[in-house]
Amino acid sequence: MSARQSSSIKAIGLHIYGGPDVLHAVELPEPHAGPDEVRVRVRAAGVNPADAMLRDGSLAEWYRDFEPPFIPGMDVAGTLDEVADDVKAAYGLSEGEPVIGIVDNHGRHGGYSEFVVLPAASVTRQPVGTTFPEAASFLMNALTARSILDSLALAPGSTLVVTGAGGAVGGYVVQLAASEDLRVVAVASEHDEEWLRSHGADTFVARGADIAQRVLDVVPGGAEAVADSAMLHDLIAPAIGDNGQIAVVRFWDGDPGRGIVVHPVNVRSRITDTAAVIRLREQVESGELTLRVAATLPADQAPEAHRLLEKGGLRGRLILEFPPAPAM
């Protein structure tokens, strides 16, 4: 167990919703691992769109029963600092090991923290040969991509259209789908075409207002399914064949008709899926999944990281490195 004696830890959080500048250093009670849990000394935390949704109030209804400060962050990499005895036996994990984990952040529990306690089922060893920032860049997005493909359950040879294919989730959908012998039609900016073709896309379609017709031009009759990581919704639905499927990463109450099934995907339902977490780590190690870090910033520059995230156009994840500056 850790010899750390402090009764508080540093984190980056917010007391009020708003723009990037509401993020600031805070102090929290020191957490400790209980049964079936581990404590991670965080060295790097990924900055995801879900973090911005927490910060700007988009998730206010979900957080209404919690007291601030609220701590963003769902992707972490670091070292195991406390490991419950039952975990050592069941998972083969021990103090000092470098690990990655996915955080079901809520209230004062989030990845932008010096230390975070997680279910052991949400943690696996850090991929061999990766740095902490690289290791913190992929798990949430890759697990979302895995959940999309599992919800669609397409047979090999089926055609899958991936919107937002140049982004973090879409890029992992492309790579995982290609590894499962699906025909991948990638929709993204023209600047992403070379990268997507080199990572498994069979066909590339440049994004645009007439995107459904552009897809139909290369997939007559429509695709079996769409992985809609760009949230195009009604714009892309006409490119799906009758009785097809669409997986969406945020809530959509639309009805595309024609027997098309809509699959809402929420990664939080998979964060204790140990087998999936371990498999994704193995696919990083085998080269099936490519890690992309857009930039690394000190944790106390979280506002700047969120400003960069809002500007868009990133290819790869922004990463915060810990520890943060002292709270004021």
Image (cartoon, grey):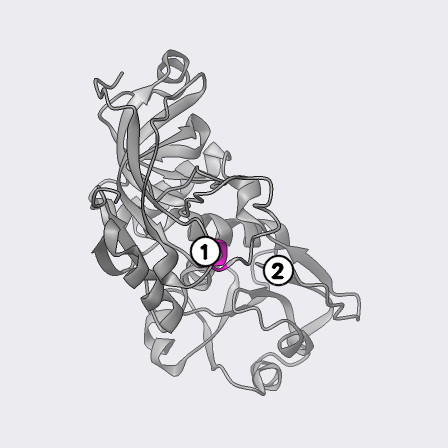
- Closest to the camera, between mark 1 and mark 2, is 1
Q: Is residue 176 left or right of 192 when viewed as pictured?
A: right
Above-or-below relation of 299 to 103: below
Q: Do we see residue 312 in this rendering?
A: no
> Would you say the residues marked 1 and 2 are in contact, meaning their CB atoms lie under 8 Å apart?
no
Please check the rendered image and state whether residue 54 is part of the magenta-colored stretch, yes or no: yes
**Relative image position of residue 244 (x, y in whole percent):** 70, 65
Query: In this picture, which residue range is highlighted in magenta?
Result: 52-56
Residue type beneath disc 2 = Ala
Q: Is residue 68 left or right of 11 when viewed as pictured?
A: right
Residue occupying image coordinates x 58% and y 87%: 210
Residue type beneath disc 1 = Arg
Circle 2 is placed at which residue position?
247
Q: What kind of secondary structure does the magenta stretch mostly adopt?
A: helix
Q: Do we see residue 138 in this rendering?
A: yes
Residue occupying image coordinates x 42% and y 17%: 90
Choose between 134 and 109: the one closer to the eye. Answer: 109
Circle 1 is placed at which residue position?
55
Q: Quadrant of the C terminus?
A: top left
**Relative image position of residue 299 (x, y in whole percent):** 25, 50
Please check the rendered image and state whether residue 89 is part of the magenta-colored stretch, yes or no: no
Which residue, as the protein is rendered here, is positioned at the far front?
A: 328
Residue occupying image coordinates x 42% and y 26%: 120
